[in-house]
Amino acid sequence: MAIEDNPESRLRYGEELRSRREGAGFTQEELSVRAIMSRTHIAHIEAGRRRPTVEDAQRLDDVLGAGGVLVRFLPARGEGLAPERFAEALELEQRATVIRTYAPKLVPGLLQTKAYAHEIFRSWFPPKSPEERDALLGTRLARAQVFDDCKSPVAWYLLDEAVLRRPVGGAEVMCPQLRHIANLGERGRIRVHVLPFAVGPHVLLDGFVTLMWFNELPPVAYVEGLNTGRVLEDPAVVRNCQTRFEHALGDALSHQGSLALIKTVADDYEHAEQS
């Protein structure tokens, strides 16, 4: 029977990991080198603040000779709610006090309307069943509840102009989607900046990145590509991502200029839908 993922089960898992590490005579640093993980990540797992991925648990189990215990008793999340590669980032997202995201092609998940998210899930390969899509949709919409708090997290979004121009679901989906983003920006709930096509190449062309800051944890970066997603914790790597974000932000339109462009493109979609 799977162990439910919650703070208590993560704490028990962390205590088991610490006991086996100390029994093997390893420091956290020595285990991190052998398991190809950061020492900070191992420290957070042992303290019950983080949950390792299945791949992390397998490496820890192999290094410590735990006979599969650290994989079998890994606290499990509900199936179908999020890809494993994104599960850790999703948990961190809910705890973040500051979130800064660069999106190169699609509206970031926290900003997606129900109709937009539905179209994204319909395009996935291999295809998902209607039940799986409904579960994913529910998770995505629940994530956006972080904006129900009027102050935390402080959220900045850097959007490539392609995000506005790609007609996901057509004009009838894009028009309300862009107006939703503009509304959040006008209410001051988020800051949004658009990198116009005219900028040309920039330092974030490599792909999607989310930067997160916390009260009790060091900052992290989450990067994502085709069938891949990874939380980065190394301070030098995270700082590099932060610097690149700031560099690209300097090339973007102002918050007010970006809102004006978003509303203009929304108007264009509305006119296209009417015609």
Image (cartoon, helix red, strand yellow):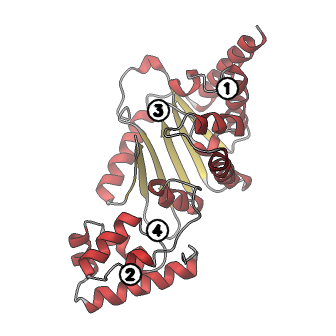
Query: How many other residues sit within 10 Å of disc 2, few (<14), some (14-19) or many (≥20)?
Result: some
Classify mark 1: helix, strand or loop. Answer: helix
For marks 4 and 2, the one nearer the N-term is 2
Query: How many other residues sit within 10 Å of disc 4, few (<14), some (14-19) or many (≥20)?
Result: some
Task: From the viewer's perspective, tell me whether residue 62 is left or right of residue 154.
Answer: left
User: Where the N terminus falls, by quadrant?
Assistant: bottom right
For marks 3 and 4, the one nearer the N-term is 3
Q: Which residue is mark 3?
A: 104
Badge number at residue 69 = 2
Of tags 2 and 1, which is closer to the observer? 2
Name which residue type carries label 3. Pro
Taking the spot 29% from the left edge, 66% from the top edge, the residue there is: 37
Confirm or deny contact between disc 1 and disc 4 (CB under 8 A).
no
Q: Which residue is mark 1?
A: 174
Cα–Cα gap, marks 3 and 2: 40 Å
Q: Is residue 251 above or below residue 137?
A: above
Q: Which residue is mark 4?
A: 217
Q: Work out whether residue 138 or residue 244 is closer to the camera in this orientation and state it.
A: 138
User: Percent x, y for residue 216?
Assistant: 50, 71
Of tags 1 and 4, which is closer to the observer? 1
Badge number at residue 8 = none
User: Percent x, y for residue 44?
Assistant: 42, 74
User: Percent x, y for residue 139?
Assistant: 64, 53
Query: How many other residues sit within 10 Å of disc 3, few (<14), some (14-19) or many (≥20)?
Result: many
